[in-house]
Image: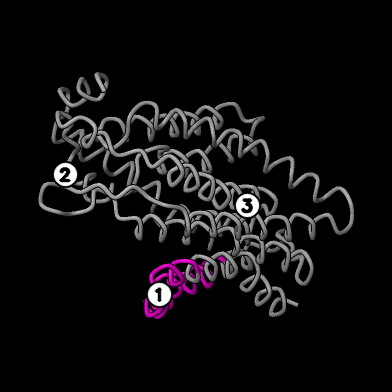
């Protein structure tokens, strides 16, 4: 906590704005769009690796959050005053940091993929460390939160690479990964849905953390995992598209795919909000991943023949 209090004393309006922009960018649709374009046009295996780390990393992060149920720094120490803009979105439990997990999944995956390009590895590590710092500077996570998240993300990076390499080793191994992954994700959903949650209240009678919101986040993470697994296995089995295509084809894939993804992120998401809050989140993220990994490749693969 002393570290957060020290950071609190060096804040400025300019630095607040810059670091809020950094932390918001990490979770923006731009990052997912970049992954999709990488997948459609340049390197499927690298994009698979990034997508698997984002989805499974999110599930592990939510599992830990909802198991330990650690409150935010300002709840444990009233002297901690988070930056107001960051406070608005920091509604759940604190440990481990979700933003650190996302940044690690995105940028450290690229670092592993491009390990021969030392300068790029350095940039990816620097961005990850910067995101970790922003979460401390903004007052929404402790140092333990971000370090634990980084450590867990590194383990996930190692395990997912081993799994993808193993799946490519022999025929039908991908089916083993699919069914085991679906079972693990389902067990995760059942556990986080039925487990007891602490119910502590503010002086005015509001829950410090609403368990329903935390369970909703778990369903969103499960949607990512289900969507990844279904999209991954279906593309491997029924599409198997190529990325060594003409520049014109890559431009068309990028533009058309991005427009449809934007429609999914707006129109489809609004339509799914009519479902129960948990199932709506699960369905949206599952649809988004299945579209990126399977449905759009199925469309352009047939049109380009």
- Residue assigned mark 1: 276
- Residue drawn at x 49%, y 59% is 33
Q: Residue furthest left?
A: 204
- Find the distance from the CA under tag 1 to the CA under tag 2: 30 Å
- Find the distance from the CA under tag 1 to the CA under tag 3: 31 Å
- Residue drawn at x 22%, y 45% is 87
Q: Is residue 187 shown left or right of residue 172?
A: left
Measuring from the top left, give residue 62's x and y in whole percent: 47, 48
Numbered disc in front, either 1 or 2: 1
**Label 2 or label 3, whichever comes before in sequence order:** 3
Q: Which residues are magenta?
A: 254-282
Asked whether 250 falls inside the magenta stretch, the response is no
- Residue assigned mark 3: 47
Circle 2 Cα neighbour tier, 10 Å, few/some/many (<14 / 14–19 / ≥20): few
Specify the quadrant that holds the N terminus: top left
Who is closer to the viewer here, 107 or 176?
Answer: 176
Q: How many marks?
A: 3
283 shown above or below 126: below
302 shown above or below 246: below
Measuring from the top left, give residue 276's x and y in whole percent: 40, 74
- Residue drawn at x 56%, y 54% is 188
- Residue drawn at x 60%, y 63% is 226
Q: Mark number for residue 288?
A: none
Who is closer to the viewer here, 187 or 250?
Answer: 187
Q: Main secondary structure of the magenta part?
A: helix
- Residue assigned mark 2: 84
Secondary structure under the numbered disc 1 in the rendered image:
loop
Secondary structure under the numbered disc 2 in the rendered image:
helix
């Amino acid at each position: 906590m002393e570290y957060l209090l020290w950071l609190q004393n060096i804040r400025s309006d300019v630095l607040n704005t810059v670091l809020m922009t950094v932390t918001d960018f990490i979770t923006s649709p731009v990052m997912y769009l970049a992954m999709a374009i990488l997948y459609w046009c340049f390197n499927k295996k690298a994009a698979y690796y990034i997508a698997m780390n984002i989805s499974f990393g999110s599930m592990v992060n939510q599992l830990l959050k909802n198991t330990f149920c650690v409150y935010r720094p300002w709840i444990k120490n009233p002297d901690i005053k988070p930056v107001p803009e960051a406070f608005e979105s920091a509604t759940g439990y604190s440990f481990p940091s979700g933003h650190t997990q996302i940044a690690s999944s995105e940028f450290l995956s690229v670092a592993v993929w491009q390990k021969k390009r030392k300068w790029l590895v350095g940039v990816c590590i620097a961005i990850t460390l910067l995101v970790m710092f922003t979460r401390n500077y903004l007052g929404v996570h402790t140092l333990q939160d971000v370090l634990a998240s980084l450590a867990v993300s590194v383990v996930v990076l190692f395990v997912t690479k081993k799994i993808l390499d193993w799946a490519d080793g022999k025929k039908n191994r991908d089916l083993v990964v699919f069914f085991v992954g679906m079972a693990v994700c389902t067990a995760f959903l059942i556990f986080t849905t039925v487990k007891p949650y602490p119910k502590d209240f503010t002086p005015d009678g509001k829950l410090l953390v609403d368990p329903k919101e935390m369970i909703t986040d778990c369903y969103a993470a499960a949607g990512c995992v289900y969507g990844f697994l279904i999209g991954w296995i279906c593309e491997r089995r029924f599409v198997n598209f190529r990325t060594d295509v003409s520049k014109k084809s890559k431009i068309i894939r990028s533009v058309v795919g991005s427009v449809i993804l934007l429609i999914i992120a707006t129109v489809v998401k609004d339509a799914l909000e009519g479902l129960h809050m948990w199932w709506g989140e699960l369905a949206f993220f599952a649809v988004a991943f299945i579209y990126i990994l399977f449905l759009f490749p199925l469309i352009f693969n047939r049109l380009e023949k």
